Amino acid sequence: MDSIIEKVLNFKKEDIPAYEPYLMVGAGTPGINLIKGKNIYVWDIDGKKYLDCTSQSWALHLGYAHPELNQTIKEQIEYAHHFHSGFFTMLRYMLAKKIAEIFPEKMNRVLIQVGGSAAVEAALKLAMINRPSAHNFIALYGGYHGLSFMTTGASHTGTMASGKYIGGSKLAHFSQNFIRVPAPYYYRPYFEVTRTDDKDEVDRRCLQILEMQIKYGSTGPVCAMLMEPLQGSGGQLTFSKNYLQGVKDICKKNNIVLIWDCIQTAFGRMGTWCAAEYYGVTPDIMVIGKSMGSGYPIAGIVVSDELEGFKMTDWIDGSTFTNNQVSQIAALKQIEIIEKYNILENVREVGSYLKSNLEEIQKTCPFIGDIRAIGFHIGIEFVKDPQTREPDYAGCSAMRSKGYQNGILFGEGGTGKGKNVLKIKPPLITTREQADEILEKFSASLNDVYGK
Ligand SMILES: Cc1ncc(COP(=O)(O)O)c(C=O)c1O
């Protein structure tokens, strides 16, 4: 075994202080020390095993050390791992063509980027090229699009969403501040509603405000609207088809490019290749990333035939590693594996099994206020009281900590003064038996936090 790998595998907690002072991490929810993973399980530095419901920032659709993916990567690195983007490579052609095939009609051109934030920026640049006289952008309350200067202006981390200004707000003078409009948060609308369960009213008012902001709240024509079709970081919010179609219609009417940030939703997490397929509504540009390379860094945009694209010689978008052969073959192989083992069907089946069982558990626990789930995109909102719906930030955080004790990794989300939405987003290969294990560990953690 290679001596570096051997050292990693034999690392002890006592060794950490000798290394810690040299490391700087710019963002993240502090976790535990992880060493290795297999299938949907991961082991920490003490050898403790956890079932991973975070898929490591929802990126590992095939889990850890997938044997077929690993074999392909091992073979590929013997031939090539990095070429500069100016050289034409077969893998890049093949990947772009395959994505165009599995994504909706008219979404036929793919640009590759290295990470999500850069891909979102590429989408915004392309929108500007297509709407040269419009300079303003719209985003949703609670949206998350990355932490680069430009995407900071669109993400909730730079606003008062968490009760105070954090993160990118300190750098706001360098970033373009997006015009923000409320997202339809049905369980906890941003405005007073007549009836708490009237989703149509929430949709109607959100669409109305969007129209008002375009008309009265923008200093000039709006170039693009950037939104997640299912808001992940901001609380696992699922939107109605009616709302998504309404936004599309308003954008079309006002000549605004509609960009869907599909970084969390694409490649199967909803049980379809993308949110557009799930809803039957297609935007002008889709941004992809995270799970795209099954854990290898790759992202991109998928562009409608109706838009003008980038030209290579214009030098508007690109970077050194946008033609990484390992990431590209990982992305292609992942699609092949998803097709071969009917993994989208697995997500639909096991996802609805998880949802219905969680809803049964909800009946016994008043602190589970709302469950929002599509496929393996599951969010559980904790409240102190189901009547007042007061968020239970401490309870959700305790669920995550108890999860560690019970051998399960949960994610946390939401944009309040803390996070009160527990996320269950395991790799797409999770079986029904493993779903039972998730439910068992979830119930044990619930019992530890809230009692029977
Ligand atoms: C919806 C969405 N957009 C954009 C990003 C930013 O992607 P990256 O972290 O790869 O820059 C993220 C990352 O969490 C995301 O969830």
Image (spheres, grey):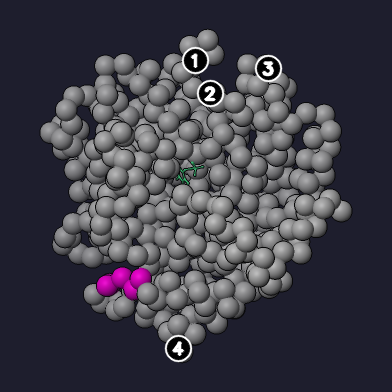
- The local secondary structure at tag 2 comes to loop
Say which mark, if any, is on residue 88.
3
Mark 4 or mark 1, earlier in chain? 1
Q: Residue furthest top?
A: 313
User: CA–CA distance between discs 3 and 2?
Assistant: 14 Å
Residue 268: image location, x then y, percent: 58, 47
Instruction: Please name the residue that numbered disc 2 is placed on.
Output: 318
- Is residue 389 positioned above or below 211 on the image? below
- The local secondary structure at tag 1 comes to loop
Instruction: Please name the residue that numbered disc 1 is placed on.
Output: 315
Locate residue 332: give its quadrant: top right
User: CA–CA distance between discs 4 and 2?
Assistant: 53 Å
User: CA–CA distance between discs 3 and 1?
Assistant: 16 Å
Foreground: disc 4 or disc 2: 2
User: CA–CA distance between discs 4 and 1?
Assistant: 59 Å
Residue 32: image location, x then y, percent: 58, 66
Residue 141: image location, x then y, percent: 29, 48
Main SS type for the magenta part?
A: loop
Residue at (18%, 31%) from the top-left corner? 218
How packed mark 1 is, by other alpha carbons closer than 10 Å (few <14, some 14-19, many 20 or more), is: few
| Magenta segment includes 392 | yes
Residue range highlighted in magenta: 389-393
How packed mark 4 is, by other alpha carbons closer than 10 Å (few <14, some 14-19, many 20 or more), is: few
- Is residue 318 positioned above or below 149 on the image? above
Residue at (61%, 58%) from the top-left corner? 19
